[in-house]
Amino acid sequence: MEVDAPTDERRYRVSDPSGFRADPDRSTVRAGMLRFIHSSDLHLGKRFGNFSGDLPSRLREARHAAIARLAQHAQEQGAATILLAGDTFDTETPAADVRRQALAEMAHHAPIRWVLLPGNHDSLQATQLWATLKAEAPENVALAAEPRPVELAAGAALLPAPCTTRRPGRDLTEWMEGAATPEGAIRIGLAHGAIRSFSEDGVASDVIAPDRARRAGLAYLALGDWHGALEVEPRTRYSGTPEPDRFKHERPGEALLVSIAGPSALPEVTPLPMASFAWRRLDLHLLDGDDPAPALEGLLPEARHRRQTLARVAAAGRSNLAGRAALTAAIERAKPDFAFLELDDTGLATACEAGDLDGIDRAGALREAANALLAEAGDESRSAGEREIARAALARLFFYAQAVAP
Amino acid sequence: MKISALRLFNVKRFAGRGIAIEGIGDGVNVLCAVNEFGKSTSFEALHALFFQPHSGTPGEIQKLRPYSGGSPLVEADIQTAEGRFRLTKQYYGGRSARVTDLATGRLVAQADEAENFIAGLIRGGTAGPAGLLWVRQGVTGLEKRSRSEEDGEKEVRRSLLESVQGEVEAVTGGRRMAEIMAAAQEALSELVTPTGRPRTGGRYAAAIEERDRLEAEEGRLAGEVDALRAALDRRAAAARRLAELDGAEDRRERRQAVETAEAGFDAARAHDGKLKTAEAELKLARERKDAADRDLGAFRTALAKAKELQERLREAERRRAEASGRRRDAAAAIEKAHADAEAAEAGEQAMRGLLARLDAALKAREAAERLAGLKERLSAAEAARRALEEGEARLALVRIPAHAVDELQALEVEIAKLRAVEEAARPSVAISYQGGAAGPVTMDGIPLADGEERGYDGQAELSVPGIGTLTLRSNRPARSDDRIERAEAKRRTLLASMGVDDLAAARERQVRAERIEAELRELRGRLSLLAPEGLARLRESVAALDPAGAELLELKEDPSQVRAALAAAEESRRKAKLALREAEPLRGSADDAFVRAETALASLDAERTQVAALLGPEEARDRRAQAMADALDERGRALAAAEAHAEALRTAAVDPHSAEAALKRARSVEAAAEQEINALRETIAGLNAEIRTRSEEAVEETWRETAEALSAATARVAAFAKEVAVLQRLASALEAARSEARELYLGPVMAELRPLIGLLFDDVSITFDERTLLPQTIRRSGQEEEVDRLSGGMREQLSVLTRLAFARLLARDGRPAPVILDDALVYSDDDRIEKMFDALHRQSRDQQIIVFSCRQRAFQKLGGNVLQMTDWQP
């Protein structure tokens, strides 16, 4: 009844609970070349509560669609196995529909084999999840829930380092160094966690040794957790998430096609495009007098892609009141094109010119108010918050003054 | 601008005719006319000319139209810096507006252009304030008025205020400022209340609400996720523990431990049984040996005892013989003492009988003697008694009551007294005989002695010898009372009752009675001496003593001798008794000694018999002792063997308790393990259900979703908070700027107003309402007062002064504007009105002031240019 039953060597191969079944027809290393797809961090079931409208469901759907796309790549690239290096599910208790639909999708692409590694989001602590997965997993889905070598294909052994808990607090890959595999087998490590500071959740207490591949004699160490694809060293890579979920990483979501000629051969890695949504952080640097609208337009992706794009325009540099108003207006104009578009203008300094103030009023009480706000915005003795408020108030005054005919 | 003439036609009651006011000059112009003379109509027409476009027909214009209809025409000549112009407006039919240059007669502008020209005059265009300043009858712009009045003059007042507001606008930012402020305020009020709290139902409040809701939800979900994770952890721990416990190897080990312990326990128990048997055998051997030991000892003791008994028996027999002898002696002594005692007793008894008889005889004799005495006394007593009775009978005859004699005596005295009195009162005769007188004179036959005085009653006859008979008559009346007779009757009665004849006899009887009484007393004394307890008692004593046939014994022996004999007999009896008493204990002790001796002998005998029985026949005794010693030796050996056996077993023994404890422990370990396994399975089952439920609810996904939504909501709230801060900052900046502008603007007005106010009031300062730009409060001698609360006169004075100040300001700016007052000083008293006139004249130096008033007399004092109304036809 328990998924995390004690290690029982006798079950290795004979009746592998994880679903590893030797399939001589498909799993032999053809022409001495081992090919598989390395992906991770699908975060199935992530709900994106920070967005509104139908965007969350679209993003969620996109994550599910990644399964089919991975399978398609595997088929096209002749890879028999897809290694998912953790965080396949966003939570330890994914909703039943998320789980069942994912498994159904994976089953549909048999005989491609899926290997699911427990990550920090769906660690083995989630015994319910893994027990259910074990019960429901179709034949072509294997659960790498135990740290012991399993046969990936003829002549290739997989050494998984499943996350035992959300924060194991130790290097789970350590066991790989002493793990015995058949002579001449290609050793593939599969792990989830941070190397140095590459921790997606900012937890660095349980880092994986960066030279683990070398020390454990691994031909390739497939890592998950970091959502951007990253080559740590030639044998150690993060695949990144196939479907990004935040503005943190610049690269679009991708999966890695890994080909290994032999136990000591360097892996040949090819990125495969994956993402259906692009998460873009667009840096817009403005100078005094720049017209922000064309600058922005030059930065935004072509119209056709905008529907699948979430973009954050990070404005920086300097602008006058008119320029700022124009930028805001331009963003507002462009918004409907995008899945999501927002302006981060915290980095944009506002330069006020006499002309700007004249735009409010040449003299009189309005001009006096504008002068007072401008002075306050530039008053170094005030707190940054107060200055920002004054600056924004001035911008607002400008905006109103434009709206009210002189 | 200055107005030099006003003309109107077909206005109000001037239907079909017109009036003109010409020659309006600089300084103060006064149009004083009675009511209904067209004064107010002129004012209204002038107002319409400047403020109402020719094309419209608003209420004010409708009011200008006569009841009969027609088209009102208004015309004014004005003078500005540019020149002199004529403004003409016609409303309704043939509506038109024209501006004509009076210098050239050129039509400067008409229709809308003319309107623009006029508006430029009033509002001064964008360059600055200009125009006209109006104060209307009773309308100061300061006070609240009744609704009907308000409605009627609303338009007028509003336009007046508008004119003032228009001047302010340019300085304070005016309409743009107001619109921007309104926009900012509107944006702000959508978010927050005037006090800065999020407005209920607003977007800000909704965002906060949403954030709070999400926060709570997030907290709840986090709790649930924690619970789920805790449940997962607990289940994992339980499962791990279960795996540890439930492993086959562990099970086998526990089982084996139990079995081993069981075997150990069984072995220990068996050994224990053997040991117990050996111990029992050992005990038996010891007992047998001890028995033999005892037998032998007893036999030996018995032997010794037998010897000793022999001795003691002999001694006891000797003692018994001795005691028996003593007992015999004692018995003899006692026998003898008994006999002596009995003899003495018999003797004594005889003596005692004799003495008793003797005593009885003595007593009988004494009684007889006493009886005789008593009888004697009795007869004496009876004699005394008889004498007593006789005496008493005698006494009864002579006894007179003692007081009767005294009474009698008293009566005698009384009678004597009465007689003496009577005698004294009786006429009496006495004669003194001369010597030689012939015979004595007799009186009633009785001679009268010489010197004898004789009385008489009634009449007396004196026979004087020799002379004849002399009759004496007293002639006195009869005695009036009968006291003497009554006393004498009483005496007779008394004497009769006593049975005596006179007092002496009574006395004599009294003496006799006393004597008899004395005798009686004596007799009584004797009687009581003889029979102190009464005669009857005495008789009884006699009767009691009288021995009925008692014979008197003859006493032959001498009682004293008898007594001595008795004493001797008693003495001898006592001695016999003492002897007996002495002898008896002797026998007792002899008996006791004998009994003791017998007992001792008997017990010794019994002992000897017992010992003998124990020892058996004498000849076999030695053999028997030997046999017993042998048996003892043999049993001693057997004991040693048994002891060795038991010791061996003891050394080899395993404590069955420890073995049992070990077994118990092993079993409890097994049982505890089983129990824990069951408990763990239950726990896991419970957790399974909990985890399954929560997993199926996908609580963690919901939590993450909520957390993300919360961060978005928090950001949104922050954005709103910033927006609120920005808008508030903007609003405050605008407000501050406007206030400053107004102060700036009001400065010159105040400067102009101050000297004017100084004309009327002492020590008064004024603050202006920013909205109306009219005085709001005044400050007098340190007290602040709302203008609303001031008197009507003061209000209108302030109103006029304020407008004069504005006008002066305008004039100073090179843009003079006329001040038009229509019956503006209705409430002011004469003193104040003169001061107001002073103020008007003071202003009028470089200012045109047009005053309309119906108070002709009061306004005569105003002076100035007096205007006249004339008929006019266009």
Image: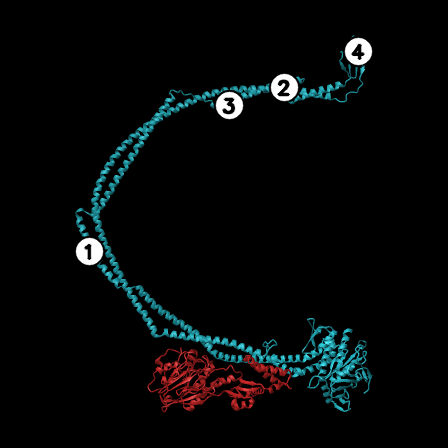
Q: Nearer the viewer, mark 1 or mark 4?
A: 4
Q: Which residue does the numbered mark 4 point to in the structure image?
A: B463
**Label 2 vs 3, first from the N-terminus:** 2
Give the residue at mark 1. B634
Q: Quadrant of the C terminus of chain B?
A: bottom right
Distance CA(mark 1)–CA(mark 2): 150 Å
User: Along the polypeptide, which appears first: circle 1 or circle 2?
Assistant: 2
Picture quadrant of residue A191: bottom left
Q: Are marks 4 and 3 on the same chain?
A: yes
Instruction: Give the letter of the chain under mark 2.
Output: B
Residue A363 as seen in the image, left or right of residue B288: right
Q: Earlier in the sequence, mark 4 or mark 3?
A: 4
Label 4 crowding class (10 Å Cα cut-off): few <14, some 14-19, many 20+? many
| Residue pointed to by mark 2 | B510
Q: Decide which of tag 4 and tag 2 comes sooner along the chain.
A: 4
Which three-letter amino acid code belongs to the residue tagged 3?
Leu
Asked if marks 1 and 4 fall on the same chain, the answer is yes
Eyeballing the image, is B617 above or below A304?
Answer: above
